[in-house]
Image (cartoon, helix red, strand yellow):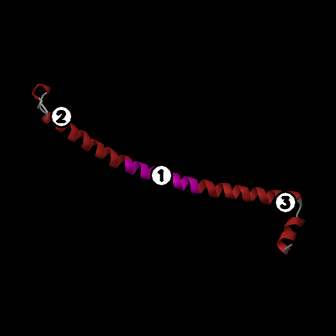
């Protein structure tokens, strides 16, 4: 065994458990920070996407309304 490993194993059980628990808390904090950072990026991208898509859908509705307004009435349909 290496010297640091022997030193760690020679510690009292409470010290080893405390070190392990501290490591887990640190890992949890890092995971939370990374997750919140990613969530913020997802929120920003979702807002950008919704703004772009809503604008596109509004244009589509306008085109559809224009098409329906210029369409001949149902009584004068061409006989295909």
The residue that disc 3 covers is: 15
Say which quadrant the N terminus sits in. bottom right
N-terminal-most mark, 1 or 3: 3
* In this rendering, position of residue 49 left or right of residue 37: left
Dot 2 falls on a residue whose secondary structure is helix
Whether 48 is among the magenta residues is yes
How packed mark 2 is, by other alpha carbons closer than 10 Å (few <14, some 14-19, many 20 or more), is few
Dot 1 falls on a residue whose secondary structure is helix
How packed mark 3 is, by other alpha carbons closer than 10 Å (few <14, some 14-19, many 20 or more), is few
Residue 78, percent across and down?
A: 11, 32
The residue that disc 2 covers is: 68
* In this rendering, position of residue 21 left or right of residue 56: right
Residue 24, percent across and down?
A: 72, 56
Which label sits in the foreground, 2 or 3? Answer: 2
The residue lying at 43 percent from left, 52 percent from top is 44
Say which quadrant the C terminus sits in. top left
Mark 2 to mark 3: distance in Å? 77 Å
N-terminal-most mark, 2 or 1: 1
Indicate which disc residue 53 carries: none
* 74 is higher (above) or lower (below) than 44: above
N-terminal-most mark, 2 or 3: 3
Mark 1 to mark 3: distance in Å? 40 Å
């Amino acid at each position: 065994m290496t010297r640091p490993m022997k030193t760690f194993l020679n510690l009292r059980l409470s010290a080893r458990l405390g070190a392990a628990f501290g490591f887990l808390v640190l890992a949890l904090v890092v995971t939370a920070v990374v997750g919140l950072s990613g969530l913020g990026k997802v929120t920003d991208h979702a807002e950008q996407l919704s703004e772009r898509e809503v604008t596109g859908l509004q244009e589509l509705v306008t085109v559809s309304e224009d098409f329906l307004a210029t369409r001949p009435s149902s009584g004068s349909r061409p006989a295909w």
